[in-house]
Amino acid sequence: MTQAKKKSSAVKKVVLAYSGGLDTSVILKWLQDTYGCEVVTFTADLGQGEELEPARAKALQFGIKKKNIFIDDLREEFVRDFVFPMFRCNTVYEGEYLLGTSIARPLIAKRLVEIARQTGADAISHGATGKGNDQVRFELGAYALMPNVKVIAPWREWDLLSREKLMAYAETHGIPVDMKHKKGGSPYSMDANLLHISYEGRHLENPAVEAEESMWRWTVSPEKAPNKAEYLDIRFERGDPVALDGKKMKPHELLAKLNQIGGKHGIGRLDLVENRYVGMKSRGCYETPGGTILLKAHRAIESVCLDREVAHLKDDLMPRYASLIYNGYWWSPERRALQALIDHTQQSVNGWVRLKLYKGNVILVGRDSKTDSLFDPTIATFEDDAGAYDQRDAGGFIKLNALRMRIAANRARKKR
């Protein structure tokens, strides 16, 4: 049985990112036993759809003062200030992943630091393992916002490195464990918020096997989706969605509604082997129905509103921007600089997009902007354009662009 050994430490008070689950409940007790410090718990409501009050009850059970228990509704801030700014860049990591876990971490780090300052804490703590990306995201964010904060990462300090040891520690210290854990644990390691839900672990660690259908929580399989298509109208202002089917909605309400609608049509499932920051490859499965719909819609409205070279520049920058978020650099100066450029491009991205949802597919069927469209039908037409476009101009353009290749070809011919 592993027993915590008390450390001599200058840490007097620590803010713990606390879900109330097995891992963070063990960490709470371990911090008390190992560091002998006062613990403040912080539980974030990011729209994960779970009852959060049990976390308060567990914290009270282990002697956490009422004033030191923070359960914060961050749904609106999460979508408005993190998800939507990311989507303005059409952000996708490694061609597929919509960064649902990654984009939540900078907000949690921000709130951890705010609570540390508010309560006079000199340290923060999290439950991320030493194998994962989240340790990097939490800690880079914390150091960027509170440079001298001490970070306690139990998974890098303790020897409770298996489920059996965690369970034994919980049993010894009277930490309540859900029956599902006693029977072998929930089948997957999951993370959920308003943008997505992720699944890792168990048989998913073999990338050759198909995910079980019973695993998915937000989406039906495309085979079981309705046989009738559903149409959606999404209105954008300055690159952000503001209304659904003519009804104005707050950001978190709009994303939640799209999750519901998209999930019904089997939209947004992803099975991905990604490259983690620490160097290993990891397989995860994701459900991102609302985000998948928004990405399609945003690119559609940009297609009529953005200048060609501006759109291409954004596409060039997107992989770099995605890597910054994935690797935990949301609060870095380079991400802020990129965001300023991206947001500048979005001033003219205003209009509506119509989509058809059918059996896992998001099909674009219309888009327009009355105020900012650069699509000119009098020029683009295949019919008589009444002189709007002089087709003879294309000849000179082609010859100028071919000049360097013609010179090279003539030189190569002379050498033969």
Image (spheres, helix red, strand yellow):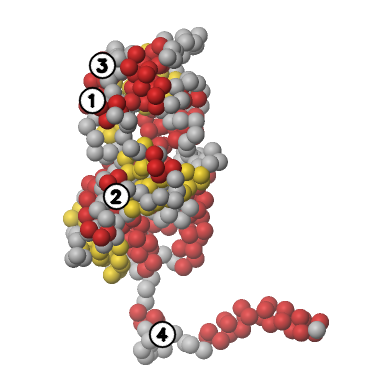
Q: Is residue 146 above or below residue 5?
A: below
Asked whether disc 2 touches disc 3, contact meaning CB atoms under 8 Å apart, the reply is no
Please provide percent x and percent y for residue 393. 52, 85
Residue located 46% across and 9% down the image: 6
Residue occupied by mark 3: 60
Separation of residues labelled 1 and 4 (CA atoms): 68 Å
Within-10-Å neighbours for mark 4: few <14, some 14–19, many 20+:
few
Report the mark closest to the observer, 2 or 4. 2
Lower sequence index among marks 3 and 4: 3
Please provide percent x and percent y for residue 398. 58, 82
Instruction: Tell me the number on the disc at residue 54.
Output: 1
Q: Quadrant of residue 356?
A: bottom left
Within-10-Å neighbours for mark 1: few <14, some 14–19, many 20+:
few
Lower sequence index among marks 1 and 3: 1
Q: Amino acid at mark 1?
A: Pro
Circle 4 — which element?
loop
Separation of residues labelled 2 and 4 (CA atoms): 56 Å
Please provide percent x and percent y for residue 251. 27, 47
Q: Amino acid at mark 4?
A: Ala
